[in-house]
Image (spheres, rainbow, N blue to C red):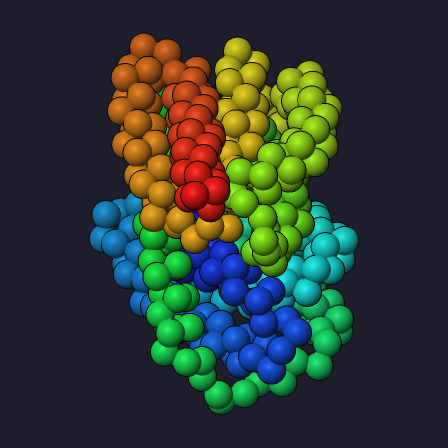
Amino acid sequence: MVVISLLTNLFLNPLYQSSLSLIPQQVNNAKKNVLKSTLYTLKKESNIKAFFIILAFLLVLDFANILEFRIHLFFFSFILYKLTADRGLELTVIDSEENFILSSELRLLEEVLKFSFAGLLFFIFAKSVESILIGYTLGFLLIIVILQKLRKGYTKTKNSLNVKFNSDIKNFIKPLYISGFMLWIINISDRIILGLYSDTAIVGKYSANYAICSFPILVLAGTLTTILYPKFFKSKNNTYISYFKKNIKYILPIYIFSLIGISIFINFYGSTITRIFLGSNFQGGSEYIIWLILGYIFYGTSLIFESFLLKSNKTNYISKIYSIISVLNILLTFILCSFLYAEGAAIATFITFLVQLLLNILINLSLGIAKDTALAS
């Protein structure tokens, strides 16, 4: 799952973010199918790269005696990545056409199916890695079948976009590859570093609490940004700061109100959920769970502010922010884990995402003021 997460952050998320910025501009004209075809071509290219990266990753794990290389494990890993790519692009097209309710329902259904199948097979087949991969694969397959039924007469075309348009895509997407890789580093570094100071039982409990705290908040933030992205990219004739203020006033109250409910629920029942799904061996962590909740609240909020940077094509700022906070996260985790252990990793996550949010706010405000000043003059 680690390599799937890396490939998703490195190849797929930047592709979908760029498509969200460009597809809405073409929804009502003849370039619509041309653009979608171009995105499908880019996805196929990423599949080829992913094939060799997954193979290399599993061979390295085998060489390091971490995980024995098994051909079926490689097969399921690649299939899972390909299905992730297929369903992601289909959902992106639905997003671009502003079918927000349908898109949100499908994303929520996808998560329920993935975790239901993975959890069921995990216990049936003696808690093996393959059971999780197969469970996720079954969840993705069902979603893709549903998407195929819902998809509106998309016809592939061999046409290509003009040079300038392709150049715009590349300029937009390049910094997002960097930010995707840095986010992956942040997501795995705390558990790796914690493992240097603690035993596997503590790392396992921390990972379980990390997943339970992050999942509902990321689903909420993802749903809101799904709605926001196409609207942002379609907006015209608005100064940056006025558009920023208008949408923040609309979206933040909904987000904050939802977060309060999620945070209270996780704080009181997170440990119980862990025990139900993973067993009593993974229960614990009440002393640091609040840091993880607050950290992901800040991260989810920063995604909303990040939307405005995507809106203004300032993806270079996004990559710089993720580069800064990834280094910060590693340093903080090393320092704090040395004497606070799992709580130190949680506090490092909290500080990292707080800094990310502050940087996003500061950059948004500085760009907005500068742009409005230029327009006024």
Residue 355 sits in quarter: top left
The answer to whether 51 is drawn above or below residue 190 in the figure is below
Percent from the top left, x then y, of residue 30?
A: 60, 82
Q: Is residue 76 left or right of residue 251?
A: left
Q: Residue at x 33, y 15 (%)?
A: 336
Percent from the top left, x then y, of residue 331?
A: 27, 24
The answer to whether 286 is drawn above or below residue 182 in the figure is above
Q: Nearer the viewer, residue 96 or 298?
A: 96
Q: Across the whole image, how many numbered discs are drawn on residues?
A: 0
Quadrant (top left, top right, bottom left, bottom right) of the C terminus: top left
Q: Residue at x 45, y 80 (%)?
A: 161
Determine if residue 117 is in view. no
Residue 48 sits in quarter: bottom left
Determine if residue 15 is in view. yes
Q: Residue at x 40, y 49 (%)?
A: 314
Percent from the top left, x then y, of residue 228?
A: 63, 48
The answer to whether 254 is drawn above or below residue 12 in the figure is above
Q: Nearer the viewer, residue 231 or 127?
A: 231
Residue 335 sits in quarter: top left
